[in-house]
Amino acid sequence: MPAMNELEHAVALLRQGELVAIPTETVYGLAADAANPAAVAKIFALKGRPSDHPLIVHIAGLAQLDDWAIDIPAEARALAEAFWPGPLTLILKRQPHVPDAVTGGQDTVGLRAPSHPLAHALLERFGGGLAAPSANRFGHVSPTTAQHVRDEFGEDSPLILDGGASPVGVESTIVSLVDDTPKLLRPGGVPREAIEALLGRKLEHHQNNKTAKIRASGLLDSHYAPRTPLLLGSAPRLMEEAVQRLASGERVLLLLRTTAASIPRGAELQSLPDDAAHFARELYALLRRHDRKHDVLLMETPPQTPEWLAVNDRLKRAASTRLD
Ligand code: TXA
Ligand code: MG
């Protein structure tokens, strides 16, 4: 944990309209004062992100919910009470004062109270809301350590508060409560089933339409993606693929969750955690560590069971091909 004066320094920078990279329990965020459009513009400039993409506003807790949202349904308050602080983002109707720069011009706002102690302490001291996307350049793998953020921005790095490795490792679960039916916009740190149990009804699962459409046309093929092609498949299918690629001289890394009987000669091996929480925690660090060191990453597809939902979602976006 950084010293208290570093926290004060961060608060001062944020008040001046500067950016600060902050640890959260999910991934590191690139934060700016959400009430200051000029500060928020710096996020888009540094990330290289299209400015119509809305940002999540991070708040200290439930007490700030009404500062940012209106017409808040009882279900939203119940979710916030149950899962905040924590990896859950609620999409709600916005207060009119929320800058368009934050909402991408939409009449809704994404809100979340992170549980990371450093992020929480910062938000309490700052008092307002912090707009923060993941602290990576647009389309890159999200950062889960302070060093990842430094690797992303190099000399352009803002102050980075180092809060250690993010314990959840994948982004927050996003639930929209602006219509009559609650919708799951992004699976993440809070399991879908926990939300459904609390609400007493099912969530409709909506793929982010924009992402889906752009991806379908092949324009946004690098979201969450490493530069080295990542292929997903069953262990036996990966072995065949490895043999073929090794024969044509490629450098192959096999990332396997289960123990394989035999690894083709010449392939390198990275074993993967076999439970979903550990896998999620290590996923982005693994993709970063192995990127651009091989010609292809061959990763064993995780089980298609509920606890793997968020991991499978990110892998689907990160992978260039699914072998079976
Ligand atoms: O765990 C997280 O959520 C991390 C940490 C830093 O809090 N943040 C994060 O931010 O993942 P970002 O910008 O990489 O992803 C935010 C997602 C985007 O897919 C965006 O479209 C969606 O949230 N989003 C934000 N505001 C929205 C809104 N008003 N309506 C619909 N989607 C929204
Ligand atoms: Mg992101």
Image: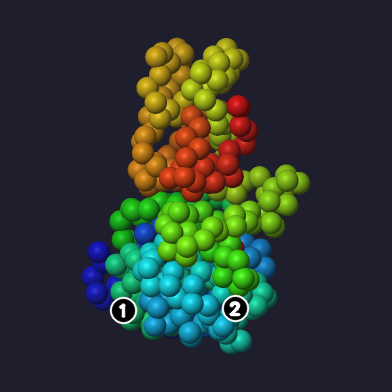
Residue 195 in sight from this viewpoint: no
- Dot 2 falls on a residue whose secondary structure is strand
Amino acid at the residue labelled 1: Glu
| Residue depth check, mark 1 versus mark 2: number of the one nearer the observer | 2
- Give the quadrant of the N terminus: bottom left
- Label 1: element kind: helix
For the C terminus, which image quadrant? Answer: top right
Contact (CB < 8 A) between labels 1 and 2?
no
Give the residue at x 60% y 66%.
181
Q: How many marks?
A: 2
In the depicted view, which residue is nearer to us: 88 or 26? 88
Image location of residue 8, percent across then percent down: 31, 79
Compared across the picture, whether 14 is left or right of 186 comes to left
Q: Residue 258, percent across and down?
A: 39, 26
**Horizontal relation, residue 224 to residue 26: left or right:** right
Figure quadrant of residue 190: bottom left
Q: How is the image coloured?
A: rainbow
Q: Going from the N terminus, do you reach mark 1 or mark 2 first? A: 1
- The residue at the far right in this view is 217
Q: 166 or 109, which is in the foreground?
A: 109
Q: Which residue is at a point 62% across and 36% down the rendered structure image?
A: 320
Assess disc 2: are there few (<14), some (14-19) or many (≥20) residues with their C-alpha within 10 Å of its C-alpha: many
Q: Amino acid at mark 2?
A: Lys
The residue lying at 48 percent from left, 59 percent from top is 196
Q: Quadrant of residue 20?
A: bottom left
Residue depicted at 57% across the width and 12% down the height: 247
Q: Residue 247's mark?
A: none
Label 2 belongs to which residue? Answer: 93
Crowding near the residue tagged with mark 1, few <14, some 14–19, many ≥20 C-alpha atoms within 10 Å = some
